[in-house]
Amino acid sequence: MTLVDQARAVRENAHAPYSNFKVGAAIRTASGAVFTGCNVENVAYPEGTCAEAGAIAAMCAAGEREIVEVAVIADSPTPVPPCGGCRQKLAEFAGSQVPVLMATTEGADLTLTVGELLPGAFGAGHMEKS
Ligand code: THU
């Protein structure tokens, strides 16, 4: 199964009764393993979590830290982009050249790199002053 197909499959498990907007994410790591996540909303709205955050948590729980490829999918009119917070979360574990494939359930897709999605990213270097 392709990475986007794995994102499409996990999307079915999203818990999105408030937005009715189900999202699926799949990330491949340097080892070749794939971790998936879906959005999990909460009646206390700010407590909801994004699909990408779920996939990243699963990756870390498995002891992995290096993302080499990302796919995100939703039933959106245009390929769904990760939210701002998720761009920062991805940048924690993915180099700026890592491709992020954004897809619609109807088959459209667009690929941008992590660096293109988060130009000028805040990084560890910004906390260093000699
Ligand atoms: N959502 C994601 O899961 N990932 C994104 O990057 C965009 C937004 C979810 C959060 C919320 O459950 C729903 O989509 C509507 O914002």
Image (tube, rainbow, N blue to C red):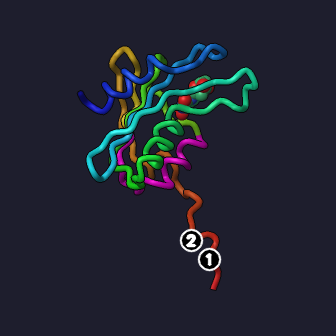
Bounds of the magenta segment: 84-100
Corner quadrant of residue 5? top left
| Circle 2 residues within 10 Å: few <14, some 14–19, many ≥20 | few
Q: CA distance from mark 2 to mark 1?
A: 5 Å
Label 2 sits on what residue type? Gly
Is 37 on the left or on the right of 107, as rendered?
A: right
Toward the left, the furthest residue is 1
Ligand 1 falls in quadrant: top right
Query: Which residue position is annotated with label 2?
Result: 125
Tell me which residue sits at (65%, 29%) in the image: 48
Placement of 25 over or under 65, stated as above or below: above
Corner quadrant of residue 46? top right
From the viewer's side, name the closer residue of 96 and 38: 38
**Secondary structure under badge 1?**
loop
Label 1 sits on what residue type? Glu
From the viewer's side, name the closer residue of 42 and 72: 42
From the viewer's side, name the closer residue of 117 and 59: 59
**Secondary structure under badge 2?**
helix
Tell me which residue sits at (46%, 16%) in the image: 75
Toward the bottom, the furthest residue is 130
Toward the front, the furthest residue is 62
Is 105 on the left or on the right of 56, as rendered?
A: left
| Circle 1 residues within 10 Å: few <14, some 14–19, many ≥20 | few
Tell me which residue sits at (73%, 26%) in the image: 45
Q: Are marks 2 and 1 in contact (CB under 8 Å)?
A: yes
Placement of 123 over or under 97, stated as above or below: below
Quadrant of image for the C terminus = bottom right
Q: Position of residue 35 (x, y in %)?
A: 38, 38
Q: Position of residue 84 (x, y in %)?
A: 59, 41
Q: Is residue 109 magenta?
A: no
Query: Which residue position is annotated with label 1?
Result: 128
Q: Is mark 2 within 8 Å of ligand 1?
A: no
